[in-house]
């Protein structure tokens, strides 16, 4: 069992090679650099390494709690989770977890290709994706066919924004930390406005995002994209990119300009710039949203649940997570109830601001 900082370079190269050989999209959340960044802000981050002889053949990044309770790295924040294993490895989930000295392992964004752990899931969710493998023009033609009104309206708003507010400028990979602070302030206000917990009120998440903004590895690079009108930032997004995947994570915008739909304009420019960089997939993440329905070209499943060892570990996991998870799933699976819950959260957000 290793802390991320103690993983050797040979083991890191093996990890990267295993991910390159995987059939899963090369999501940057599954790379060793993301684990390194989490390890700097989460002292309980660990990596279990599986060996065949002297050769590393598997890695399980996780966080450890009391009594061997484990959870996926940056649980609740990371958008792709699971083990990194050699193809055809003769290992089952019980062997992996017992070898890692875990009594439970919780996940909420498990990759579909995680054959060892998918059978232990309790719920399946949809993550929305944008396929730009054939270039941005092809993607725009898909939008023109499936959502012609949406595309026409968004492009018209983009032109109007440029005329009425200032000449538009888009930066795909903005390095100015001031722009990142602006995005985080917008996102915090959005969380409060919609009655949701402000993730950036948790210092470890703020530090993680700043750390990742400085991470420049080929398969895991923090990417801040900003739409400017004149010199004024109007919308921004922070995510992670690999050579083939842009994992969308924290988008937001200045609500003063909401009538121009700057968030949608931003996503179109992100897709265009990512395609020019050779990226083939934008992963918009789990969770239904109107903007995702408008932008998506496809869907992939992700899973939530846990492996538990019978006994104390299973009991502790159930008591700490299952009641709230089941309540959340009950609401999300019923559209009318979910809409009512969203209205309630927004009302609570307004009360807090007043």
Image: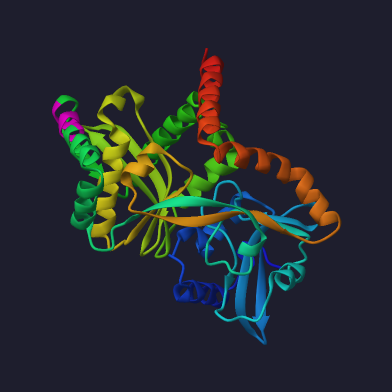
Foreground: 211 or 307? 307
Query: Which residues make up the magenta segment?
Result: 157-163
Instruction: Look at the image and tell me in which quarter the N terminus lies.
Output: bottom right
Observer able to see residue 176: no
Q: Position of residue 35 (x, y in %)?
A: 56, 59
* Magenta span: chief secondary structure: helix
Q: Is residue 81 left or right of residue 65?
A: left
Q: Position of residue 216 (x, y in %)?
A: 41, 59
Residue found farthest to the top:
354
Foreground: 231 or 297? 297
How does the figure colour the protein chain or chains?
rainbow
Residue found farthest to the right:
311
Q: Position of residue 195 (x, y in %)?
A: 54, 26
Q: Is residue 54 left or right of residue 100?
A: left
* Residue under the point 29% across and 55% down: 274
Foreground: 234 or 288? 288
Observer able to see residue 227: yes
Q: Is residue 38 left or right of residue 270?
A: right
* Residue under the point 53% across and 26% down: 340
Quarter of the view holding residue 132: bottom left
Residue found farthest to the bottom:
53
């Amino acid at each position: 069992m290793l802390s991320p900082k103690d993983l050797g370079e040979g083991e890191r190269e093996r990890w990267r090679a295993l991910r390159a050989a995987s059939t899963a999209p090369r999501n940057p959340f599954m790379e060793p650099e993301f684990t390194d960044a989490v390890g700097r802000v989460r002292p309980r981050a660990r990596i279990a390494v599986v060996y065949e002889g002297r050769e590393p053949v598997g890695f399980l990044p996780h966080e450890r709690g009391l009594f061997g309770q484990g959870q996926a790295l940056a649980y609740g924040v990371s958008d792709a989770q699971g083990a990194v294993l050699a193809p055809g490895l003769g290992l089952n989930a019980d062997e992996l977890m017992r070898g890692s000295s875990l009594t439970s392992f919780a996940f909420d964004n498990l990759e579909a290709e995680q054959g060892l752990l998918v059978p232990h899931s309790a719920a399946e969710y949809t993550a929305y994706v944008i396929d730009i493998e054939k270039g941005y023009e092809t993607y725009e033609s898909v939008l023109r066919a499936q959502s012609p009104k949406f595309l026409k309206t968004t492009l018209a708003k983009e032109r109007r924004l440029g005329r009425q507010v200032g000449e538009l400028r888009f930066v795909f990979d903005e390095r100015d930390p001031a722009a990142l602070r602006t995005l985080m302030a917008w996102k915090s206000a959005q969380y409060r406005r919609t009655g949701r917990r402000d993730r950036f009120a948790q210092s470890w998440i703020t530090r993680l995002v700043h750390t990742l903004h400085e991470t420049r590895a080929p398969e895991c690079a923090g990417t801040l994209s900003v739409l400017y009108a004149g010199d004024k930032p109007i919308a921004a997004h922070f995510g992670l990119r690999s050579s083939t995947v842009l994992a969308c994570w924290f988008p937001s915008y200045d609500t003063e300009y909401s009538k121009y739909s700057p968030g949608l304009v931003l996503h179109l420019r992100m897709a265009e710039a990512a395609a020019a960089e050779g990226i083939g997939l934008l992963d918009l993440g789990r969770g239904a949203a109107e903007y995702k329905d408008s932008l998506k070209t496809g869907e992939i499943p992700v899973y939530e649940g846990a492996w538990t060892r019978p006994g104390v570990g299973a009991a502790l996991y159930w008591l700490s997570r299952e009641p709230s998870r089941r309540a959340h799933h009950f609401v999300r699976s019923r559209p009318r109830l979910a809409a009512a819950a969203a209205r309630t959260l927004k009302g609570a957000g307004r009360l807090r601001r007043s």
